[in-house]
Amino acid sequence: MVSGFPELVYKPEEEKQLDLGPTASSLDLLQAVYRDPGQQLHTRMRAAMACLPFESPKLLATAIVDERDFATLLDRRLKRLEEMKANAIEATPLIDGEKVDVRLPPVVPDRRFRRF
């Protein structure tokens, strides 16, 4: 049939080999892919996103260094913990002026739930 339009024929493009040495790492391969203008844009973008954590440092919180050493801070915190425990023991609830034991009663095992 003659329609007046030229016949369209698909010709696959020749695949271009990336120049990588035998000791190239996967990061080198990804960098070669996203720097190659012959690659499709979405392929280059994915390769660039995969390389991003390895090429730019992450922002992390920095530690604030104090003049005191670790042992002094540890001793101070242990002392404060002991004070908190002492205050907790002294803080028993009172009902009508009497101290009340607020602990749960001991659990008595039931025969129905015994293992054989």
Image (tube, rainbow, N blue to C red):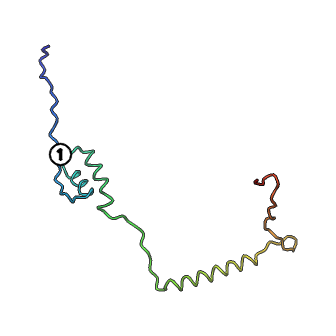
Residue at the outermost top position: 1
Between residue 27 and residue 46, name the one nearer to us.
27
Q: Position of residue 101 (x, y in %)?
A: 82, 70
**Element type where label 1 sits in the image:** loop
Amino acid type of the residue that numbered disc 1 sits on in the rendered structure = Gly
Residue at the location (54% across, 83% down)?
A: 73
Residue at the location (44% across, 75% down)?
A: 63
* Residue 68 horizontal side relative to residue 80, left or right: left
Q: Position of residue 20 (x, y in %)?
A: 18, 55
Residue at the outermost front position: 116
Between residue 103 and residue 99, name the one nearer to us.
103
Rendered position, 42 above or below 61: above
The local crowd at label 1, few if under 14, some if 14 to 19, many if 20 or more residues have their Cα within 10 Å, is few
State which quarter of the image contains the N terminus: top left
Between residue 76 and residue 97, name the one nearer to us.
76
* Residue 30 horizontal side relative to residue 11, left or right: right
* Residue 22 horizontal side relative to residue 97, left or right: left
Residue placed under numbered mark 1 in the picture: 38
Q: Position of residue 10 (x, y in %)?
A: 17, 30
Residue at the location (81% across, 51% down)?
A: 112
Between residue 105 and residue 53, name the one nearer to us.
105
Q: Position of residue 45 (x, y in %)?
A: 28, 49
* Residue 50 horizontal side relative to residue 105, left or right: left
The image quadrant that residue 5 belongs to is: top left
Q: Disc count in the image?
A: 1
Residue at the location (18% across, 57% down)?
A: 21
Rendered position, 112 above or below 40: below
